[in-house]
Image (spheres, rainbow, N blue to C red):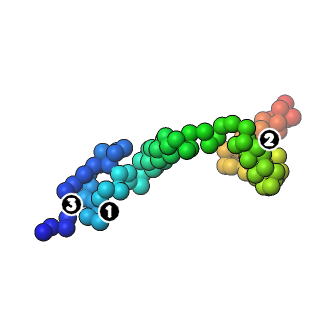
Amino acid sequence: MSLRSKRRNYRCCSEFFFPDYRNQRHRCYCGKPICRHASKLASQRRWLGEPANRDYFRGRENARRAREWRSAHRCFQARDFPIKSPKEGPMDRQRLAYKKLLQLRTQKL
């Protein structure tokens, strides 16, 4: 009896692979970013498709639950995060140097 499974392909990228015989029914997506994204979308659709989860994000009681969570976790609100200035990159330094050069040239004229 052979423990090696027949080759299959991933659902998203369609690349072939040999699944482990103990895990062959679970493995459907590879680790590439596009496949991981497709896997997440599929799992979210499955979760939202269940009758108990369909109205999880809707209705008054769920809005109340979200408001209570937000009031208990104020540190996650966007207005409480400190505003950071963008870091100066090499192109910014070149632009500043070019502006200074133009200013010096116009002052000399």
Please state which amino acid type lies under the numbered disc 2.
Lys
Q: Is residue 31 above or below residue 50?
A: below
Mark whose residue sits in front, 3 or 2? 3
Q: In the image, residue 27 lies at what x, y percent?
A: 35, 56
Mark whose residue sits in front, 2 or 1? 1
Q: CA distance from mark 3 to mark 2?
A: 67 Å
Disc 3 residue crowd, few under 14, some 14–19, many 20+, Cα 10 Å: few
Disc on the earlier residue, 3 or 1: 3
Please state which amino acid type lies under the numbered disc 1.
Asn
Disc 1 residue crowd, few under 14, some 14–19, many 20+, Cα 10 Å: few
Q: Residue at x 73, y 38 (%)?
A: 60
Please state which amino acid type lies under the numbered disc 3.
Ser
Helix, strand or loop under label 2? helix
Q: Which residue is mark 3?
A: 5
Task: Give me the disc on residue 11.
Answer: none
Q: Residue 10 vs residue 108: left or right?
A: left
Q: Which residue is mark 1?
A: 23
Q: Residue furthest left?
A: 1
Q: Residue at x 12, y 69 (%)?
A: 1
Q: Residue at x 29, y 66 (%)?
A: 22
Q: In the image, residue 23 lies at what x, y percent?
A: 32, 62
Q: CA distance from mark 2 to mark 1?
A: 64 Å
Q: In the image, residue 67 lies at what x, y percent?
A: 78, 45
